[in-house]
Image: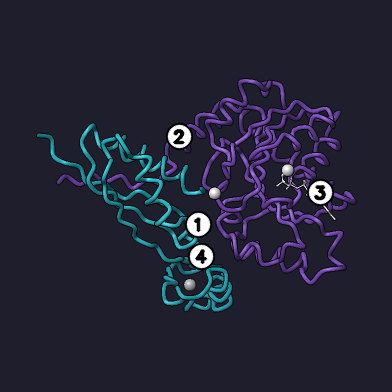
Amino acid sequence: MVNIPVLKEVTEANTILADYLRSRFTHVLVLNVIASPGAGKTSLLERTITQLNGTLKIAVIEGDPTTSIDAERIAAVGMPVVQINTQGGCHLEARQIQRAVEQLDVADADVLIIENVGNLLCPTEWDLGEDIKVVVASLPEGDDKPLKYPGAFLKAQAAVINKIDLEPYIAAKAATMRENALKINPGLAIFEVSCTTGEGIDVWLDWVRQKLAEKRAAEG
Amino acid sequence: MHEMPVTQALLDLALEHAGGRRITDIYLQVGRMAAIVPDSVEVFFEYLSEGTLAEGARLHFEMVPLEMTCLDCGSKQDLSAWADQPPHTILQNAFARGCACGGKNLRVTGGVSFGLVSIDVEPES
Ligand SMILES: Nc1nc2c(ncn2[C@@H]2O[C@H](COP(=O)(O)OP(=O)(O)OP(=O)(O)O)[C@@H](O)[C@H]2O)c(=O)[nH]1
Ligand SMILES: [Mg+2]
Ligand SMILES: [Zn+2]
Ligand SMILES: [Zn+2]
């Protein structure tokens, strides 16, 4: 027998394609939004789009296991959107993004937002060529989520704690969730928001603008 | 269903490294928190590898325990002693304990990924 060392993550081929896509995504800030089902990904996109509209051009890729409901919500707020149905698959992969950008004019977009499939496990393993992974955590789902899904928080650069309008009615506390998230990843930028009331969204949007400016400055 | 894409990915990666030779064994490392169930990988592998040079290959899974690294002194702690507890409890306790050096800045540095270590192939005849 001949033993051949490989020493790679099994998703290596996806990562190579993602790196290629990243090299093509110049001047556009790409966000990969990851969260469990119903945490508020689409709501965050709607808020972000509506409030940035007029100042920044946004394009959206919607991942969904079966339906086009979320893509319709995005189209309703007037943004170019491409829908990827994963046929039940639990995450998006780089080759799906490659196909989606063929149908979407990202060349003159400022921000490309990808809504991943609702799942906190697998999407973190599949790089999509994004600049930033954003994990959205819904407060009523429990403030221990970062400890239960450390992979997502470990690989993200930003965590959006959503549904803080419900805090008075539940045991989970945004401060505890923040603390748990920082234990997993001290470098995380954390935003406490309510997509329903709009609270905290401005701080999040300032951060997105700042990241876009940083990316463009680095590109020269 | 969830192990199917990773199984396809590991099969592709193994075949790519086999250089056209038949694969007999595949050595894998599964992180305790990688959310991968070896039994499911086996099932999908049997199905996906059919008709390829990896058909019939044996899969060997090495479970990788959670590992934390202290940012203050660089020492690593292996959390396998607590492997019977749920992972989030292990993590919570590890953060509370901190490091032997007194440091409290720990990072998770192992036990979250699914890696292909090596493959055995038949020698060219
Ligand atoms: N109270 C409250 N409800 C919210 C908030 N954000 C979202 N929701 C509600 O949560 C539900 C799910 O929101 P979505 O934005 O569809 O969540 P999602 O993560 O896109 O869901 P999937 O794509 O199906 O995984 C909807 O009923 C929203 O109205 C919030 O800040 N506060
Ligand atoms: Mg959605
Ligand atoms: Zn999955
Ligand atoms: Zn130490």
Residue A61: x %, y % from top left: 68, 32
Q: Is residue B99 above or below residue B63?
A: below
Q: CA distance from mark 1 to mark 3?
A: 33 Å
**Dots 4, 3 in contact, CB < 8 A:** no
Question: On the image, which quarter does residue A213 sit in?
Answer: top right
Which residue matches tag 2? Answer: A16
User: Looking at the image, is mark 3 or mark 2 earlier in the sequence?
Assistant: 2
Q: Chain of mark 4?
A: B
Q: Nearer the viewer, residue A90 or A173?
A: A90
Please, what is the three-letter code of the amino acid marked with disc 4? Leu
> Marks 1 and 3: same chain?
no
Q: Which mark is residue B71?
A: 4
Q: Can you tell which chain is drawn purple?
A: A
Q: SS for tag 1?
A: loop
Residue that badge 1 annotates = B35
Tell me the CA gap for discs 4 and 2: 30 Å
- Secondary element at tag 4: loop
Left or right of B104? Residue B41 is: left
Left or right: A180 with respect to A46?
left
Whether A124 is drawn above or below A75: the answer is: below
Q: CA distance from mark 4 to mark 3?
A: 29 Å
The span from disc 3 to disc 2 (Cα, nearest Å) is 33 Å
From the image, tell me which residue sits under label 3: A203
Task: Report if the beta carbon of the residue with label 4 is closer than 8 angstroms to ligand 4.
Answer: yes
Would the CB of label 1 be found within 8 Å of ligand 3?
Answer: yes
* Residue B10 point in image, percent of width and height: 38, 43
N-term mark: 1 or 4: 1
Q: Which chain is cyan?
A: B
Q: Are marks 3 and 2 in contact (CB under 8 Å)?
A: no
- The secondary structure type at the circle numbered 2 is helix
SS state under label 3:
helix
Question: Nearer the observer, disc 4 or disc 2?
Answer: 2
